[in-house]
Amino acid sequence: MARLVMKFGGTSVANVERIRNVARHVKREVDAGADVAVVVSAMSGKTNELVGWCREAAPLHDAREYDAVVASGEQVTSGLLAIVLQDMGIQARSWQGWQIPILTSDAHGSARILGIEGGEIVKRFAERKEVAVVAGFQGVHKETGRISTLGRGGSDTSAVALAAAIGADRCDIYTDVDGVYTTDPRVVPKARRLDRIAFEEMLEMASLGAKVLQVRSVEVAMVHKVPTFVRSSFDDPENPQPGTLICAEEDIMEAQIVTGIAFTRDEAQITLRRIADKPGVAAAIFVPLADANINVDMIIQVVSDDTTTTDMTFTVPTSDYERAMTILEGARETIGYASVAGATDVVKVSAIGIGMRSHAGVAARAFKALADKGVNIRAITTSEIKFSVLIDAAYTELAVRTLHSLYGLDKA
Ligand code: ASP
Ligand code: MG
């Protein structure tokens, strides 16, 4: 008998009427004989409101109390869905993170799941065919027993981790789009919905800007090999579409060289000019940034022709840009640079595909195509299954569209 986890996002549970629609999807699977655990987000906008209240109460606040507040959105929707299911004649019970429990680290606000005790839920599947309605996004800190949350978008991770813990056959992530697209359809109307995408590709897509899933949920799905569908909750509950399957590479029949194009505006560029070209200088720059928990992404070092000084360009998250600049200005003496400059009106565009492993010249074609359109590239990084270019934000659409058609991703 099939065992599955169904996860519904904020827009899918935005009000009681929509929760009733969610219940119809659940009923379909229950009627088909499946054992079902449902994971719900808070009503759309709710978590933002709760976060806002915390900030209003005090700009700097105790992260444990933040978690006590923001976890409440999911408590409401899990209870409401259980009520609606019961009203439809389906056995259902809500579960908060601490009741299961979903044990987490102590990183309040962005805790990691350490373990899930799924035994009671599974027992109730067998004993009374009871649907478990689980509050997403939240858990409980293993040692203190305090409520924790998993970071924004964390109910995706709750769902996949629960699926792994109870040995579910698959995890269905219901959202407001009908699957994973080759790129953002709002930017490229010719974007196509993918039938399948490999875990590794999805991980890169999510890390490089695709907003459809929380990055950590894809990591968990990959590690535990949980087949995960992204599909629409707005489909007719009687006749739903399958959506996009995220699965192991071996299960993809016709691999493309490039599967998708992602982009993110969340990156800023910093350039240090005329730093000494000698051992230790990279450490002098990047150790203080790492100590301040600033994630450096692309790095380019240029050897200048006088060979005594060089330039260093790198990117940091836009939200850390000001902090990084302050740290670098403070470390001017120890690093020893002539000047520092930065830009925040930049975008990182990436092409992702497992086919890149076995094909040469994939990125080179992109550089040529972008040059033909007059798009200047500020920085480049490549790895096994992706490459990224940093360009002026004004060229985002042009660059994304150019790469999308270059690699044959446009729908007919
Ligand atoms: N409600 C939480 C958020 O808005 C968790 C989630 O929706 O995944 O981030
Ligand atoms: Mg989400």
Image (cartoon, rainbow, N blue to C red):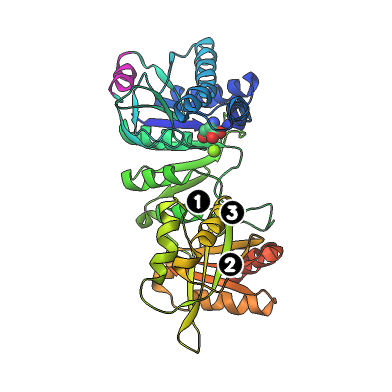
Q: What is the number of the mark on residue 322?
A: 3
Q: Where 151 falls versus 332 (above or below)? A: above
**Ligand 2 visible in quadrant:** top right
x 45%, y 68%: residue: 335
What's the CA distance linking mark 2 and mark 3? 19 Å
On the image, numbered disc 2 is attached to which residue? 390
Q: Position of residue 395 (x, y in %)?
A: 69, 66
| Upstream in sequence: badge 1 or badge 2 | 1
Residue type indicated by callout 1: Ala
| Upstream in sequence: badge 3 or badge 1 | 1
Residue type indicated by callout 2: Leu
What's the CA distance linking mark 1 and mark 2? 17 Å
Magenta stretch: helix, strand or loop mostly: helix
Q: Position of residue 232 (x, y in %)?
A: 58, 38
Magenta segment range?
A: 119-127
Q: Position of residue 50 (x, y in %)?
A: 59, 26
Residue 32 can be seen, yes or no? no
Q: Residue furthest front?
A: 333
What SS does tag 3 mark? Answer: helix
Which quadrant: the N terminus? Answer: top left
- Between disc 3 and disc 1, the foreground one is 3
